[in-house]
Image (tube, helix red, strand yellow):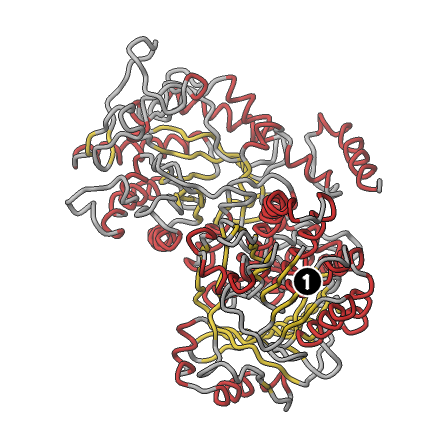
Amino acid sequence: MRITCIGGGPAGLYFGLLMKQLNAAHDVTVVERNKPYDTFGWGVVFSDATMENMRAWDPETAAEIQEAFNHWDDIELHFKGRAIRSGGHGFVGIGRKKLLNILQARCEALGVKLVFECDAQSDEDYADSDLIIASDGINSRIRGRYAEVFKPDIVTRPNRYIWLGTHKNYDAFNFLFEKTEHGWFQAHVYKFDEQTTTFIVECPEHVWLAHGLDQADQEQSIAFCEQLFAKNLQGAKLMTNARHLRGSAWLNFQRVVCEQWSLQNRHGSHVVLMGDAVHTAHFAIGSGTKLAIEDAIELTRLFKEQGDEAGHIPQVLADYQAARRIETLRLQNAAWNAMEWFEVCGLRYCDQLEPEQFMYSMLTRSQRISHENLRLRDKAWLEGYERWFAARAGLERDPAQPAVPPMFTPYTLRSVTLKNRVVVSPMAQYSAVDGIAGDYHLVHLGARAMGGAGLVFAEMTCVSPDARITPGCPGLWTDAQGAAWKRIVDWAHTHSDAKMAIQLGHAGAKGSTRRAWDGIDRPLLETDTEPNWPLISASPQQYLEGVSQTSHAMTRADMDRVKADFVAATQRAAEAGFDWLELHCAHGYLLSSFISPLTNQRSDEYGGSLENRLRYPLEVFAAVRAAWPDHLPMSVRISAHDWVEGGITPADAVEIAKAFKAAGADLIDCSSGQVSKQEKITFGRMFQTPFADRVRQEAGIPTIAVGAISEADHVNSIIAAGRADLCAVARPHLANPAWTLTEAAKIGFTELLWPKQYRSAKPQMESLFARAKAQP
């Protein structure tokens, strides 16, 4: 084949040499606009795993790189006058120029043609090529030429950064944080050869502007950064090799994702994007070079597997995109998480967190590194952090005792102390009769109270007959219902040390529907045994357009009645002995319908601005808080994101949380969605945790994280990083009432007490998990 690589970065050079090595008959040319053995940029990093991959494909190149690279395991944080170090992270650092020189020399040795100082304008200049690799970087001309085919999604991020270097040596990957009168700056610092270190300085746009750096030239910017990090630099100078850039050389990162990766041009040549031309990953996890190298490896692997003749190109390119798209999106998502952490850390973490927790949060910023993964990397550091966290939670431990995982530390609000941070979510069971929680609920909630969780929520309990979702929903509008709940709460208190919580709510426009297994959200029909009932909400609406019953807008009289119903139910909940009360203001139910602009079209003082839309839910909250015993905690569940354009956003959630905090809420339970059927939710593990994190840090109120939290590692990571104070686990608790006991045994925490009737099973379960863990 005749192969032309447009762009002599890592992707183009490495693919060229791999294909020439695969078959010396291939005519391979790499076209580069710069001079021979010349490049811009400082050091690049990639992981130990990428090096292993390179050793498998071209041992000679890998050996040269290994001789030239700097390898380190440690990450060191400099923050608030402290230096904290953690090991076991495994990075490789090498000068970009040195890396490219190695690849260039290897290409020449294999017979790849290198054409320098040639600024390729178009793929059509190489019409005789069978395959054209567009490895022409983030500002790819080839991608731009065929934008309607490649369909690039390019997002410019808000932070500013400047890529500098220094001759000061560092023996770890350093993160430096400095606060000025206008905000926080951070530096990403890593050595890449014996004399030189990369020094990337980053800050939010508003901080950059406040310091006048938009008006600074490169020399002034360097002088500013030298003064800012003077304590760490200790007299060392900062340098730039970006003289080709105009102005101050402060840049904005661009995230690139392409829908299509290849095409056949009008001359019949196949054109495929590679490296930064098709996807970028933020330097916060240093994966851009990794992606480029592994793109080249995968495309070569497919040619080796399917045949490296021109006739195989279409299928190979289709398979290449299919194979690489998943992996690159995974890495891009991790890089996005890491990038966002650095973008918001000045607002969300730097002032709020102590150095120990800040370090943990930073290490786990990408969500690829979990609690147990940190244990594998640096057990001593993690156990030290666990001890610090436990002490902050009030646990007195003998140093000879093992460290307590964060999820099993106690948590106190008002007079209530939970034995651990695990919450059984409120989960609708649709099994009440006339609103009375019966034997089913006693068994269901009693089993989960004995299952090890610190707090067990009953399902949403309705404050009136017309507040129910279905005829099977439990209530607290009669004394008989109150007595039924007291029976359950008393049983749980007698037979377990779990605390019991009630969640009070009103279904609003989502009421008068069939039980889930008879058709979730489907309205009751005349043929059903239970009659329909009229619906109320903030404004007239149908939850299921053309299907659901239409609600009517609440009048002032309706508001007064419903508020009184909430107060009466609250009083009954207190009499029943519940330890904790939550007001349900989420998921499109009645109070949520006032908060979301998707469901509130009122023109009175209860509609319009967020402040107005919150007015009635806050009225109800104030009345309930006044009726609920002062020594007991009260939380509020909100929808922190409607996942619909024009709906509630995470930024709105912060303001909602602040309003409830000012009214006396102790904690915000951060859920999302279920307000509109137009929602487009991005699911994934712990996908709603960022809402709890943001609300906790920016509104300054404790939170519960919910959503796809399914293992101890998730809970420990969330709690340890300070992303939430409690974790609510739903479906896993349906599958296994003793989920918390099981997870404790799985991670080897043996101190969690079991019900005395079940204790004979405890050592067996623990030994089975220990045995499985010990197996290779």
At horizontal 64% and vertical 64% (from top left) the residue drawn is 12
Give above or below for 747 relative to 156: above
Residue in front for this viewpoint, 493 or 194 = 194
For label 1, count other residues whose C-alpha is less than 10 Å away and answer few (under 14), some (14-19) or many (20+): many
For the C terminus, the image quarter is top right
* Total number of numbered discs in the rendering: 1
Q: Looking at the rendering, which quadrant does residue 32 occupy?
A: bottom right
For the N terminus, the image quarter is bottom right
Residue in front for this viewpoint, 640 or 776 = 776
At horizontal 59% and vertical 50% (from top left) the residue drawn is 330
The percent position of residue 547, horizontal first and vertical second, equals: 29, 23
At horizontal 54% and vertical 61% (from top left) the residue drawn is 277
- Mark 1, secondary structure of its residue: strand
Left or right: 659 as drawn, with respect to 768 = left
Q: Looking at the rendering, which quadrant does residue 215 occupy?
A: bottom left
The percent position of residue 737, horizontal first and vertical second, equals: 61, 29
At horizontal 57% and vertical 52% (from top left) the residue drawn is 270
Q: Looking at the rendering, which quadrant does residue 234 occupy?
A: bottom right
- Name the amino acid type tagged 1: Val
The percent position of residue 580, horizontal first and vertical second, equals: 46, 39
Would you name the residue on which mark 1 appears?
28
Left or right: 228 as drawn, with respect to 154 = right
The percent position of residue 54, horizontal first and vertical second, equals: 76, 59
Residue 457 visible in the displayed image:
yes
Give above or below for 700 relative to 218: above
Residue in front for this viewpoint, 766 or 542 = 542
Left or right: 158 as drawn, with respect to 625 = right
Residue 326 visible in the displayed image:
no
Give above or below for 77 relative to 729: below
